[in-house]
Image (cartoon, helix red, strand yellow):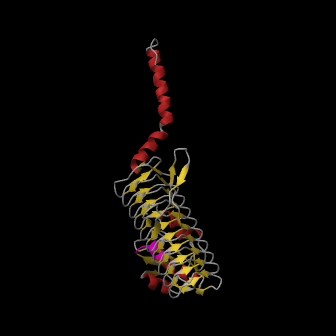
């Protein structure tokens, strides 16, 4: 990557302030800036770094008014973070390895359907009846099971395992080590205290523009489908159990576990290490803080929650404030008891 500030301003439709010929060869954080890099400034707490910034160009908001002198070139845009993300995406695409063609070392069943301009890497396995759409990339050591469908432009990174009959939509990204379509956790208790495995007859359907992080597990449904809707983003190390459904554009941070038949609404934001019991329904726009435990339905839309069990966020803050005052409250109660005992020495308190 090598680009001038003038071209960056054109790409972002921004207002250039400074040297139009400033050269950018990479990117850096504003608090760890390096020469000949692009940074962005969006959070007010980082403003002090701007005035000592070594970056060649910094993206700032249209409303930004500097309070000190600076040496870097600025580009004013509507949303610095969004503009930086768009530029970073273009830069990232240039850095990705360019693979094409089908490896002779791949194992591909004769009945599978392969689209145009696809990539299949070394030691990938494509089973009977699988359908790989145009422009898809199947990286080395990946397993695509019987009758699996992979959509247009989808990327399946090394070591991913997709079990039979599962469906992946268009423009999805499945990161290394993830397993899609493993059996749901279904075991029926028997009279002798043992458990009998319940056959898991369903599948997993992942819709379009979904990204699944590394080492996630998404279990197939007992009957029907486990469904991940359009635009969902899953972090690494997430468990989605059988018959769950995750609504459009919901984002979930690492180490979250979602028990069977739970339904998460659209545009939810779930923090790390959150646990859901089975069969709960979560309203659209719900926000849940890290390490929370969800043991009942959330019916109010666009509310924030935290805790285990969860409380509404503002109520939780009040409880935390009260909890911090407990030692002082206990001390005062003990003093009051002593005073009462002095006033009424013959009574037990």
- Residue 96 position, x and y percent, is 58, 81
- For the image, the number of numbered tags is 0
Residue 83 sits inside the magenta stretch: yes
Question: Considering the image in quadrants, where does the N terminus appear?
Answer: bottom right
Would you say residue 91 is visible in this rendering?
A: no
The quarter of the displayed image where residue 170 is located: bottom left
Magenta residue check for 131: no
Return the residue found at the far top. Answer: 346
Which is nearer the eye, 221 or 53?
Answer: 221
Looking at the image, can residue 198 be seen? yes
Q: Position of residue 54 (x, y in %)?
A: 58, 75
Task: Tell me what residue is drawn at x 46 percent, y 76 percent.
Answer: 83
Q: Which residues are magenta?
A: 78-85
Does the magenta stretch mainly form a helix, a strand or a loop?
Answer: helix
**Residue located at (48% from left, 25% from top):** 335
Q: Position of residue 39 (x, y in %)?
A: 53, 74
Q: Residue furthest front?
A: 191
In the displayed structure, 219 sits above or below 69; it is above
Q: Nearer the viewer, residue 240 or 59?
A: 240
Residue 79 is situated, as x and y percent measured from the top left of the image, at 42, 73
Task: From this view, report whether residue 196 is shown above or below residue 318.
Answer: below
């Amino acid at each position: 990557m090598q680009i001038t500030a003038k071209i960056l301003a054109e790409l972002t439709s921004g207002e250039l302030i400074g040297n139009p010929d400033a050269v950018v060869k990479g990117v850096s954080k504003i608090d760890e800036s390096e020469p000949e890099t692009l940074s962005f400034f969006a959070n007010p707490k980082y403003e002090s770094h701007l005035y000592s910034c070594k970056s060649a160009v910094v993206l700032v908001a249209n409303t930004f008014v500097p309070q000190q002198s600076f040496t870097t070139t600025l580009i004013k845009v509507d949303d610095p973070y969004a503009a930086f993300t768009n530029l970073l995406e273009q830069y990232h695409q240039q850095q990705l390895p360019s693979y094409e063609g089908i490896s002779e070392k791949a194992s591909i069943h004769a009945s599978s359907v392969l689209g145009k301009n696809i990539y299949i890497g070394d030691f990938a396995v494509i089973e009977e009846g699988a359908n790989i759409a145009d422009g898809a990339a199947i990286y080395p050591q990946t397993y695509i099971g019987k009758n699996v469908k992979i959509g247009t432009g989808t990327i399946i990174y090394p070591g991913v395992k997709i079990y039979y009959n599962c469906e992946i939509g268009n423009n999805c990204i499945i990161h290394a080590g993830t397993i899609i379509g493993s059996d749901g956790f279904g075991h029926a208790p028997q009279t002798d205290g043992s458990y009998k495995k319940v056959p898991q007859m369903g599948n997993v359907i992942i819709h379009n523009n979904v990204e699944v992080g590394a080492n996630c597990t998404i279990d197939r449904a007992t009957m029907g489908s486990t469904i991940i809707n359009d635009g969902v983003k899953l972090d690494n190390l997430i468990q989605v159990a059988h018959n769950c459904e995750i609504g459009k554009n919901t984002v979930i941070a690492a180490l979250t576990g979602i028990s069977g038949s739970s339904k998460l609404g659209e545009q939810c934001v779930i923090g790390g290490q959150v646990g859901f019991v089975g069969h709960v329904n979560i309203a659209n726009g719900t926000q849940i803080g890290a390490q929370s435990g969800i043991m009942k339905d959330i019916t109010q839309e666009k509310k924030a929650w935290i805790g285990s069990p969860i409380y509404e966020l503002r109520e939780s803050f009040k409880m935390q404030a009260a909890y911090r005052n407990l030692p002082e409250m206990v001390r005062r109660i003990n003093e009051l008891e002593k005073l009462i005992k002095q006033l009424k020495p013959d009574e037990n308190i």
